[in-house]
Image: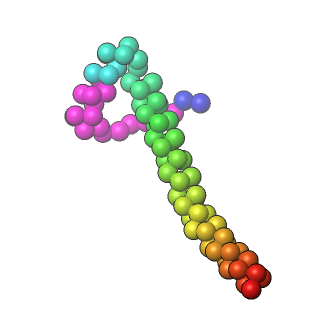
């Protein structure tokens, strides 16, 4: 389903969009959709990295606790 979107792009952004559209022979819509898909990939990548970072701290804490228990069992 196609949706109409109305926006006020800055003059600079619209000029760039026109330049890219004419040089690549793509429609402005195609360029904007590609840009949104790239942004979506970037956004998801950042979310995944953030999730891994929080899990990393948790895993390191568990490993430290396990290491402490191993040393205590050796003594």
Q: Is residue 70 visible?
A: yes
Where is residue 45 shown, x and y percent of the image? 52, 47
Where is residue 74 shown, x and y percent of the image? 76, 81
Nearest to the observer: residue 37 or residue 64? 64
Name, please, the residue furthest toward the right.
Answer: 73
* Quarter the C terminus occupies: bottom right
The residue at 22%/34% (across/down) is: 12
The residue at 53%/54% (across/down) is: 49
Give the color scheme: rainbow, by chain, secondary structure or one colour.
rainbow
Nearest to the observer: residue 12 or residue 1? 12
Q: Which residues are magenta?
A: 3-18
The residue at 57%/68% (across/down) is: 57
Q: Is residue 21 left or right of residue 54?
A: left
Where is residue 18 shown, x and y percent of the image? 29, 23
Q: Is residue 73 left or right of residue 62?
A: right
Q: Does the magenta-highlighted stretch encompass residue 51? A: no
Name, please, the residue furthest toward the left.
Answer: 11
Q: Is residue 30 left or right of residue 23?
A: right
Q: Is residue 58 visible?
A: no
Q: Is residue 71 left or right of residue 46?
A: right
Q: How many marks?
A: 0
Q: Does the magenta-highlighted stretch encompass residue 9? A: yes
Q: What is the quadrant of residue 51 in the picture? A: bottom right
Q: Is residue 43 above or below residue 75?
A: above
Q: What is the quadrant of residue 54 in the picture? A: bottom right
* Quarter the N terminus occupies: top right
Where is residue 9 shown, x and y percent of the image? 29, 37
């Amino acid at each position: 389903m196609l949706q109409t979107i109305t926006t006020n792009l800055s003059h600079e952004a619209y000029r760039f969009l026109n330049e890219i559209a004419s040089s690549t022979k793509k429609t402005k819509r195609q360029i904007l959709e590609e840009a949104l898909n790239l942004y979506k990939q970037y956004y998801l990548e950042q979310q995944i990295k953030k999730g891994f970072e929080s899990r990393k701290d948790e895993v390191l804490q568990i490993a430290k606790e396990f290491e402490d228990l191993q040393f205590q069992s050796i003594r």
